[in-house]
Image (cartoon, rainbow, N blue to C red):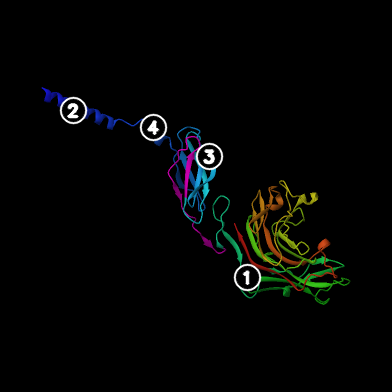
Amino acid sequence: MRRTTRVVTLLAMLVMVVGLLLTPATGPVAVAAEAAPTLKVSARNLGTVYLTGRTAHRADRVVLQRRAGTRWVRVRSLTSRRHAFRTVVWKSSRKTGYRVVDASSRRRSATRYVPRLLVTRDACGVRPLKADGTPWRCTFRDDFSGTALDTTKWVPQTDGFITGDPPGAAACYRGDNVSVGNGSLRLVARPATLAECPGLEGIFKIFTSGMVSTYHKWSQRYGRFEARVFTAATEAPGLHEAYWLWPDDREVELNWPTTGEIDVSETYSVYPDLSIPFLHYRNDVNGSVTSGAHTNTAYDCVAHRGRWNTYRLEWSATRIRIYVNDRLCLTNTSGDPAFRQKYIVMFTQALGSGTNGYDPLDPPPLPATMRVDYARVWR
């Protein structure tokens, strides 16, 4: 009888244990596991990925963190909607760990890894990425690696324009002031004779200078335009260089300034540490505008003469941005019709005017050469 009782008792205990093992956990450990936020990585495009996840409550705030060496650094705060959240992060040159931390409970997700950025190339070299993470596509390139100007792309200016500020000095443009060598385009300003610049009688000093453009060779509407440029080191007034865009007259009947002009960079020897961009269009009637949608110039774009500087234009139907050495200098969001047409590319070594006019008592060193390492355009 006692043996039977013991057997029954043991069987009852065994049933109880099995029941406990099979019963779903509802204690603190299970609640914590269920309440921890989740995180998942999914593809978006070449440069970015989506990070998505879920939270315990419909509107939880979580903090996205990125692994940086042995530390976790805050990226941004996110709030879920109906338990879900999504954000976009950029890939970097190495695989990077991310996690989210619940702002209230401090529970955190498992670490998820964003793959490293894969570098892609085309005719312009490494493909830069747009703001949305998709790559730009090369449409024009000249690295000036030959020994002569590529006349399938460029036209030297030889008539029509006179640069400078008479009666101090003036220059005409000549094709022999344009050359290519040692890996760069070279545009030279130098003293000249009246025979070289007929029609400049009465000018105190006569010079010749150089300019090239893609006139009737190539033009484009919108995109990314970039050039690396070197200007002669001097503080004496008299030299003026420009990397600029001009409307394609095959597309529009020119009526300056209404039809537009994009001066990505203008440098003046009297301001040896600045590049001054300028957008010419119907808003010229308001002079220089340095803030707001109609911003057309900037006076704080550092670019030292005697050094290589990189100038970049990013241009769409609704926005123009100009960068100097990767620093944003100008943003125009006017969406003016002047900037919704094709433009050609131009480089100019000129003489100065006004406060930057040639001063015979303090002349700049001549000959002076503007060098262009490369010109590249993407769409």
Q: Quick check: 130 above or below 104? A: below
Type of secondary structure dominating the magenta stretch: loop
Calculate the distance from the C-alpha at mark 3 to the C-alpha at mark 1: 49 Å
What residue is pinned by disc 1? 144
Name the kind of residue labelled 1 in the image: Phe
Q: Look at the image and give the residue range highlighted in magenta.
A: 97-124
Q: Nearer the viewer, residue 185 or 63?
A: 63
Q: How many neighbours does mark 1 have within 10 angstroms: few (below 14), some (14-19), or many (20 or more)?
A: many
Mark closer to the chain start, 4 or 2:
2
Q: Nearer the viewer, residue 272 or 69?
A: 69
| Tag 2–tag 3 contact (CB < 8 Å) | no
What residue is pinned by disc 3? 78
Q: Which mark is residue 89?
A: none
Q: How many neighbours does mark 4 have within 10 angstroms: few (below 14), some (14-19), or many (20 or more)?
A: few
Calculate the distance from the C-alpha at mark 4 to the C-alpha at mark 1: 70 Å
Q: Which mark is residue 28?
A: 4
Mark closer to the chain start, 1 or 2:
2
Image coordinates for residue 47, horizontal then vertical, percent: 52, 53
